[in-house]
Image: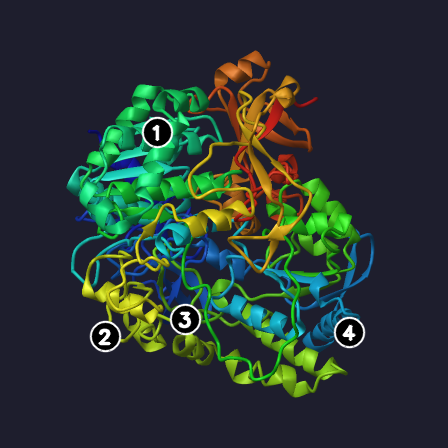
């Protein structure tokens, strides 16, 4: 077994060319400056890099603040150094045994957001120009004026009986609990269309986990289990990564896993159509066709069942529906040989994967957007939960189904409303990408007003269609840091505070762990943190409502909640399983605290469903009966029940797996067809969905003109969503969109390395620069997302202004259960750009 220690170090510490803060325990330096390996640095007698800022009068901080990085779900603690109230350094904070003081290249970019001259710092109201056009004009306004405009438009729709035509779309960047305030205002308004970022991100994994185990959360934890004092995920002896590139998306927590692997000798298998920095660390990298992970998982499951490699005692005691699953798989034909034909992975490799996973004492599955962004995301995740269930790899340390981003806190509870709220109709189909369809077609009804905390002009599928819809949208409110693409469609722009400008609970680790952060600097200009914006909007509704008394709104949103510690205390008081997560306790800890944590003497839960008193205590706080291990109706893992099968059948699915994939996967595999009618979603019953017919034969005709398969994803460790493209460091390091293409494919197409290219799909075309990458399938190209045409920072480097990668993605194909869009496969062709 080869463990590449040099590469591992580079994941977290080796980017010191851009910031000394990437070195463990390095002295603080000015954020964004060339540092530890630059001129004048030298190692001390312990091998640490010095940059001669120690004892510098000008660079010695007069205070430090404990904060947290908000660019990814590693949730790294930061020590922010300030002098004269200006940030002069960003370092990793000591004390967290998982983080070990490490941070990645993004952390110092938090300060670049604070000081960006491109920040929107005052509310803006549209005064002219075509929506979406760069010649759109806006004027500055006070908060009261801007929010009064918003309140009057929303109330006018409500008074016309059209509250249901108002929608909101949140984002992962929000301070925790903001979504609860949004939901509260929408309940008072009478609209069901309060959506979150999940369908763009990773909702399908949480939906599948809840169906199988009872909770929709990442099952295990990074670091020490407080209940037993033993290491959790670092103690695994087998890691199976599917569609997750943690070296670039979760570098610090991945570094923890690699440290554990060196200690235990665990095997790491990475399944991904391209060789990523994560695959470079693996013992084995396996490259299936895009969008065929369901077939691979079915092939593994078939072999485990056929060869009796399952954990019989665990299954007999804790699994419901195993006999039905075994009979279904035996009759299905989903053998490793069949899976090999679909995926392109040899049957012997699939058999070996199944044997090794089943034989491991503690095997941990990790997944991320590579699975979530598939047409069959829910069903794929469900089959992965079956793998864990039948092998006994659930409810114990070092194992589990660790589906990224299915985190907590999210559903934070506030006191019950004291007033009667309007009855609501059913929401639009799950997934904010359906908003465009509603605006353009009026089905099932036309959306007329929208507020977003994200940038749908970058993240939504079929971007051209979304642009058309937003131009026709009656009223749009954009909240954000910058004049991003979506802001130019807005009627009102509301400026938000950056992450280092407020205290509270912000990002969270995937393993349900959170930490408190303090404000490092004052809010820029007139910006407000998101939760304060919604409180202020509620009060604007109160002063503009002619049908309800002002108290209807204002009493539900006390001004005292503008103080986040006061708001947090309400969440702690009213949210199940959260009684022990007080501000005081969080501030006293160097490491995050994991939910559920029902009391201040409870250690928090690392491994969900562990057969341990601390878990049973936590489970009772969530509504479980005494001694109930799993939070399903049966109290056991539910692979098949008649009730679950009937529930899923209403949308065209089944409790037992049926294979299908995206119609734009080469090979004309079984796919699906959507019915025109709407039914109540069985997974999200507050909304409707289109039922589907599974197993419809594919014909592959699209590949006559578009022979390649394209995938989108994170450009590199430098970027997280689109916000990092508004930092000089982000654009300096990765401001060119590099299309990863196999050299043999490129040569066949007459494309040279670093040629400008055009990537086309049936939906449109975008530009990129070819990057020869032998570590990608020859039938596949990888197109980085998060780039957009409004990103001005790259102009200083003469970077192109790129159209969104999602221009190429077909929004018609989505997971009708979770709402996930299928970003991981689109038929395309690549050609050299005209000179």
Q: Nearer the viewer, mark 3 or mark 1?
A: 1
In the image, residue 191 above or below residue 466: below
In the picture, residue 101 is in which quadrant?
bottom left
Q: Give the class, few, some or many, for how many residues have Cα within 10 Å of label 3's Cα (few <14, many ≥20).
A: some
Instruction: Find out whether the residues at labels 4 and 2 contact each other: C-beta distance under 8 Å.
Output: no
Q: Which residue is mark 1?
A: 330
Of pointers 4 and 2, the one earlier in the residue sequence: 4
Residue 518 is labelled as 3
Q: Please tell me whether mark 1 sits on a helix, a strand or a loop.
A: helix
Q: Which residue is mark 2?
A: 601
Q: CA distance from mark 3 to mark 2?
A: 24 Å
Q: CA distance from mark 1 to mark 2?
A: 49 Å
Seen at 54% across and 13% down, the residue is 747
Of pointers 3 and 4, the one earlier in the residue sequence: 4
In the picture, residue 170 is in which quadrant?
bottom right
Q: Please tell me whether mark 4 sits on a helix, a strand or a loop.
A: helix
Seen at 19% across and 65% down, the residue is 613
Of pointers 1 and 4, the one earlier in the residue sequence: 4
Looking at the figure, which quarter contains the N terminus? top left
């Amino acid at each position: 077994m080869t463990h590449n220690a040099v590469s591992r170090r580079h994941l977290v510490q080796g980017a010191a060319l851009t910031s000394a803060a990437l070195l463990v325990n390095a002295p603080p330096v000015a954020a964004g400056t060339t540092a530890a390996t630059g001129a004048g640095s030298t190692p001390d007698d312990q091998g640490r890099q010095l940059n001669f800022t120690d004892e510098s009068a000008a660079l010695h901080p007069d205070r430090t603040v404990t904060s947290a990085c908000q660019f990814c779900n590693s949730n790294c603690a930061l020590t922010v150094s300030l002098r004269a109230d200006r940030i002069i350094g960003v370092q990793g904070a000591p004390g967290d045994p998982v983080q070990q003081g490490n941070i990645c290249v993004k952390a110092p970019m938090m300060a670049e957001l604070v000081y960006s001259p491109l920040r929107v710092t005052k509310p803006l109201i549209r005064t002219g120009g075509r929506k979406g056009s760069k010649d759109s004009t806006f004027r500055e306004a006070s908060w009261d004026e801007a929010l009064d405009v918003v309140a009057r438009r929303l109330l006018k729709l409500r008074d016309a009986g059209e509250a249901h035509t108002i929608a909101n779309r949140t984002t992962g960047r929000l301070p925790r609990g903001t979504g609860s305030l949004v939901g509260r205002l929408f309940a008072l308004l009478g609209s069901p269309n309060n959506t979150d970022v999940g369908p763009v991100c990773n909702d399908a994994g949480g939906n599948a986990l809840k169906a199988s185990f009872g909770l929709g959360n990442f099952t295990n934890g990074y670091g020490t289990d407080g209940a037993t004092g033993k290491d959790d995920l670092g103690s695994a002896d087998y890691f199976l990564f599917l569609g997750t590139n943690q070296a670039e998306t979760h570098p610090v927590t991945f570094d923890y896993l690699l440290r554990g692997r060196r200690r235990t000798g665990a095997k790491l298998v990475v399944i991904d159509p391209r060789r990523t920095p994560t695959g470079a660390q693996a013992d084995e990298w396996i490259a299936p066709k895009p969008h065929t992970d369901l077939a691979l998982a079915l092939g593994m499951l078939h072999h485990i069942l056929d060869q009796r490699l399952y954990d019989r005692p665990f299954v007999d005691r804790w699994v419901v529906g195993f006999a039905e699953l075994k009979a279904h798989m035996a009759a299905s034909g989903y053998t490793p040989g069949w899976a090999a034909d679909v995926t392109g992975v040899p049957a012997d490799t699939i058999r070996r994967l199944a044997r090794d996973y089943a034989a491991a004492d503690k095997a941990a599955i990790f997944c991320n957007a590579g699975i979530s962004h598939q047409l069959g995301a829910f069903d794929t995740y469900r089959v992965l939960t079956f793998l864990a269930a039948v092998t006994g790899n659930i409810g114990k340390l070092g194992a589990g189904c660790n589906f990224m981003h299915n985190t907590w806190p999210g559903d934070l509870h506030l006191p019950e409303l004291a007033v009667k709220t309007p009855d609501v109709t059913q929401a639009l189909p799950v997934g904010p990408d359906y908003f465009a369809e509603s605006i353009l077609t009026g089905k099932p009804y036309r959306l007329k007003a929208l507020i977003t905390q994200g940038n749908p002009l970058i993240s939504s599928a079929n971007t051209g269609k979304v642009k058309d819809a937003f131009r026709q949208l009656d009223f749009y409110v954009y909240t954000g840091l910058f004049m991003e693409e979506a802001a130019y469609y807005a009627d009102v722009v509301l400026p938000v505070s950056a992450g280092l400008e407020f205290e509270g609970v912000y990002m969270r680790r995937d393993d349900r762990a959170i930490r408190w952060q303090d404000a490092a600097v004052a809010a820029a200009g007139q910006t407000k943190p998101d939760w304060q914006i919604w409180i202020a909007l509620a009060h604007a509704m109160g002063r503009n409502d002619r049908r309800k008394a002002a108290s209807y709104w204002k009493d539900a949103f006390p001004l005292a909640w503008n103080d986040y510690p006061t708001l947090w205390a309400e969440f702690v008081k009213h949210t199940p399983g959260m009684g022990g997560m007080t501000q005081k306790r969080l501030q006293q800890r160097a490491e995050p605290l994991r939910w559920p944590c029902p009391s201040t003497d409870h250690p928090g839960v690392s491994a969900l469903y562990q057969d341990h008193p601390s878990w049973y205590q936590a489970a009772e706080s969530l509504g479980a009966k005494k001694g109930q291990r799993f939070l399903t109706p049966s109290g056991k893992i539910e692979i098949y029940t008649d009730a679950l099968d009937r529930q899923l059948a209403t949308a065209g699915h089944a409790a037992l797996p049926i294979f299908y994939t995206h119609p734009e996967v080469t090979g004309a595999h079984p796919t699906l067809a959507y019915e025109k009618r709407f039914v109540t979603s069985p997974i999200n019953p507050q909304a409707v969905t289109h039922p589907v017919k599974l197993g419809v034969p594919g014909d592959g005709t699209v590949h006559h003109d578009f022979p390649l398969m394209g995938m989108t994803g994170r450009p590199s460790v430098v970027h997280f969503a689109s916000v990092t493209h508004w930092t000089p460091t982000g654009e300096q390091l990765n401001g060119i969109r590099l299309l990863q293409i196999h050299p043999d494919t490129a040569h066949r197409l007459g494309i040279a390395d670093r040629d400008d290219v055009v990537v086309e799909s049936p939906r449109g075309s975008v530009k990129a620069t070819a990057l020869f990458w032998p570590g990608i399938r020859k039938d596949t190209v990888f197109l980085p997302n998060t780039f957009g045409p409004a990103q001005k920072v790259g102009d200083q480097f003469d970077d192109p202004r790129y159209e969104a990668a999602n221009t190429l993605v077909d929004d018609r194909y989505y997971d009708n259960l979770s709402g996930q869009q299928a970003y991981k496969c689109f038929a395309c062709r690549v050609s050299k750009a005209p000179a």
